[in-house]
Amino acid sequence: MERTGPRLTLSWVAMDGPGPGFTEIIDGCLRGERRHQQRVYELFYGKMMAVCMRYTKNTDQAKDILQDGFIKVFRSMEKFNRAGSFEGWIRRIIVNTAIDHFRRSKNAYLLLGEERSIEDFGDSDAEDNLAEENEEDVWDVKPADVINAMQKLTPAYRTVFNLYVFEELTHKEIADMLGINIGTSKSNLAKAKHNLKKLLRKEHKIQ
């Protein structure tokens, strides 16, 4: 199995969410009732906005993605089988919406700081940069500080970092999702971690 190497661990503040009793709300959404759609929006706005903020460079862009994501949620409600987590199902749609957003803006999404596209990086780059992951990093930082620093990463670094660290996808899954090779995914993750740590060190004196 993948994921046998060192991982980046963040000290994250957990937030309790609403309970699992969503039957009435889901049924109302299936009937197209606005009050139930509004209730879903109110319940999950905060958490899903936080997800969108990690994939974007500013609040306006995050709000656009969130709006598109909730539209997809309501249009796809009949596909929720009610066997799993309602929140998890919504989150997957929001994440996929964020990825789709950057696919549509491929130039902005794939462009790296050196004006080289994400496809330009191969296994050799990954091998060079994975040396930076020899030790597990544990940072005692606030979520807002991490998100602020992540928004300063290039779109490619930010996206791979999100998919690997927060969505817990393997490099193969990330490569398939973004249309890149596995070495490129590894390379961009290593560089994202390196740059993110530099930003946090500079702004918050993280050692």
Image (tube, rainbow, N blue to C red):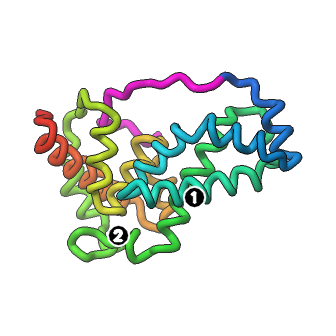
Q: Residues within 10 Å of mark 2 (few under 14, many from 20)?
A: many
Residue at numbered disc 2: 118
When the figure is inspected, residue 43 is found, relative to residue 14, above or below; the finding is below
In the rendered image, residue 49, in percent from the top left (x then y), is placed at 50, 45
Residue at numbered disc 1: 97
Residue lying furthest front in this view? Answer: 35
Q: Name the secondary structure under disc 1.
A: helix
Q: Name the secondary structure under disc 2.
A: helix
Report, in whole angstroms, how far the alpha carbon at label 2 lies from the one at label 1: 20 Å
**Membership of 2 in magenta stretch:** yes
Question: Where on the picture, by quarter, is residue 8?
Answer: top left
* Image side of residue 192 versus residue 16, left or right: left
Residue depicted at x 33% and y 38%: 144
In the rendered image, residue 4, in percent from the top left (x then y), is placed at 37, 36
Residue depicted at x 48% and y 50%: 52
**Membership of 113 in magenta stretch:** no
Residue depicted at x 85% and y 38%: 27
Residue range (magenta): 1-18
Where does the C terminus fall, quadrant-wise? top left
When the figure is inspected, residue 64 is found, relative to residue 6, above or below; the finding is below
Which sits earlier in the primary sequence, circle 2 or circle 1? Answer: 1
Going by the numbered disc 2, the residue's amino acid type is: Ile
Residue lying furthest right in this view? Answer: 31
Going by the numbered disc 1, the residue's amino acid type is: Thr
Residue depicted at x 46% and y 42%: 50
Question: Is residue 82 in sight in this rendering?
Answer: yes
In the rendered image, residue 35, in percent from the top left (x then y), is placed at 77, 41
* Image side of residue 81 versus residue 207, left or right: right
Mark sitting on residue 35? none
